[in-house]
Image: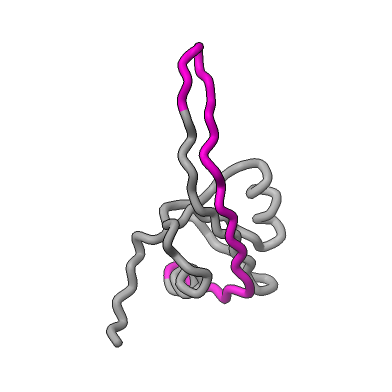
Amino acid sequence: MSSYINYDKIYGLVYTEKSNKLSANGKYSFKVDKKTTKCEIKTLIKKIFSVDVEKVNIVNTKEKTKRFKGILGSKKSYKKAIVTLKENQTINFGS
């Protein structure tokens, strides 16, 4: 088996008020590919950020219809992974 790792499966950080509060407790939210499994997410986060992952929770968000200035539109559905790190570990995003 090859040691090829596809880093394109993690799209980015989900930054909301709720995720900001969770990051104080060692939980980080990432937007991931819909076909990615928990084990893949765990190994990717471990390799990219050099941290120990304790647990991964998955949330599949549904598509929402929104109206902006009378025009009907929609927010796309996506998969969100909430990653819990082991105690006293953090992820530094370069700030």
Report the quarter where the N terminus lies.
bottom left
Determine whether, in the image, residue 23 is placed left or right of residue 12: right
Q: Residue at x 71, y 60 (%)?
A: 25
Which SS type dominates the magenta stretch? strand
Residue 60 screen position, x and y as percent: 55, 53
Q: Is residue 83 above or below residue 20?
A: below
- Specify whether residue 68 is in view: yes
Front-lying residue, 71 or 52: 71
Q: Is residue 78 above or below residue 52?
A: above
The single residue placed furthest to the top in the displayed view is: 70
- In the picture, residue 55 is in which quadrant? bottom right
Q: Is residue 58 above or below residue 66?
A: below
Q: Residue at x 53, y 20 (%)?
A: 67
Q: How is the image coloured?
A: one colour
- In the picture, residue 23 is in which quadrant? bottom right
Residue 13 within the magenta-colored segment of the rendering? no
The single residue placed furthest to the bottom in the displayed view is: 1
- Specify whether residue 94 is in view: no
Residue 64 within the magenta-colored segment of the rendering? yes
Residue 69 screen position, x and y as percent: 50, 12
Task: Give the magenta-colored segment's residue range.
Answer: 48-73
Q: Residue at x 44, y 57 (%)?
A: 34
Q: How many marks?
A: 0
Q: Residue at x 47, y 75 (%)?
A: 43
Determine whether, in the image, residue 17 is placed left or right of residue 50: right
Q: Is residue 30 above or below residue 5?
A: above
